[in-house]
Amino acid sequence: MARRPAKVGGPIARSAGVALGEAVFRSLCEALQAGSYRAGDRLREEEVAQRLKVSRTPVREALGRLAARGFVAPAAGRGLIVRNLDISEVLELYAMREIMEGAAARLAAEHASTTEIDALRDIEQALVEAPQTDTAEMARLNRAFHEAICRAARNRYLDNASRELQDWIALLGPTTFTVSGRPSTSHGEHQGIIEAIAARNGDKAEQLARAHIREALRFRLKLLQKQ
């Protein structure tokens, strides 16, 4: 069966001082996180260049970087395809995510400001109020929640590593919020993490964050079984 071509947004907006190849790479990573790319989607250099309104040279550079990171692989014929992670890679990914999310929550309990804690509550409330049918919006808010915790941890290396991990998670496809029961259980887990951070209880924050990721893995495996 032919793979559908991956969709990329319109012309990229390049920040001052950012090389065009880097801007294209960032745009592709953002599209990956947004779900514009799915496992098995084909990426053709000329099509990406046309959609982003750039020459093929920076696109070639960006695709090379994606291939080096293992996000894409050569396709039969022309172009590249977005990789599909096997079960062992999924388990390894969540094992690392558990460690990193736990560390972020512990550090956030030490460093988060009152404003940052209030922001976490606001994000979680928005997640609760999001329509249950809008799983894409729920996934976006969930990413925002975890990114906010990571920023509050005040550790740039952890923040950078977490961002890269999010790119890998995007390869898994549909959010676990599409599985019945996950939105409600996730809400309770998020609330517990927030309260532990607010109480400055690093041990509990880490424990709850790690348990949250283990539960996310349980639902991820359920979702994979249906595919």
Image (cartoon, grey):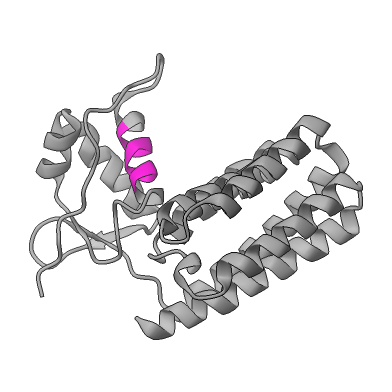
Span shown in magenta:
24-31
Q: Is residue 25 magenta?
A: yes
Q: Residue 80 in the image: x percent, y percent?
A: 20, 57
Question: What type of secondary structure mainly makes up the magenta span?
Answer: helix
In terms of depth relative to the viewer, which is nearer, 58 or 83?
83
Q: Residue 39 in the image: x percent, y percent?
A: 30, 65
Q: Residue 67 in the image: x percent, y percent?
A: 32, 54
- For the N terminus, the quadrant is bottom left
127 sits to left or right of 69: right
In terms of depth relative to the viewer, which is nearer, 188 or 61?
188
Q: Is residue 201 magenta?
A: no
Residue drawn at point x = 41 percent, y = 50 percent: 33
In terms of depth relative to the viewer, which is nearer, 216 or 32?
216
Q: Residue 82 in the image: x percent, y percent?
A: 28, 60
Residue 155: tell me if it is visible. no
Looking at the image, residue 187 lies above or below residue 125: below
Residue drawn at point x = 47 percent, y = 55 percent: 131
193 sits to left or right of 65: right
Residue drawn at point x = 81 percent, y = 59 percent: 206
Q: Quadrant of residue 111?
A: top right
Residue 206: tell me if it is visible. yes
Looking at the image, residue 133 lies above or below residue 62: below
Residue drawn at point x = 80 percent, y = 37 percent: 112
Looking at the image, residue 178 lies above or below residue 102: below
Q: Quadrant of residue 159?
A: top right
178 sits to left or right of 59: right
Looking at the image, residue 59 lies above or below residue 197: above
87 sits to left or right of 114: left
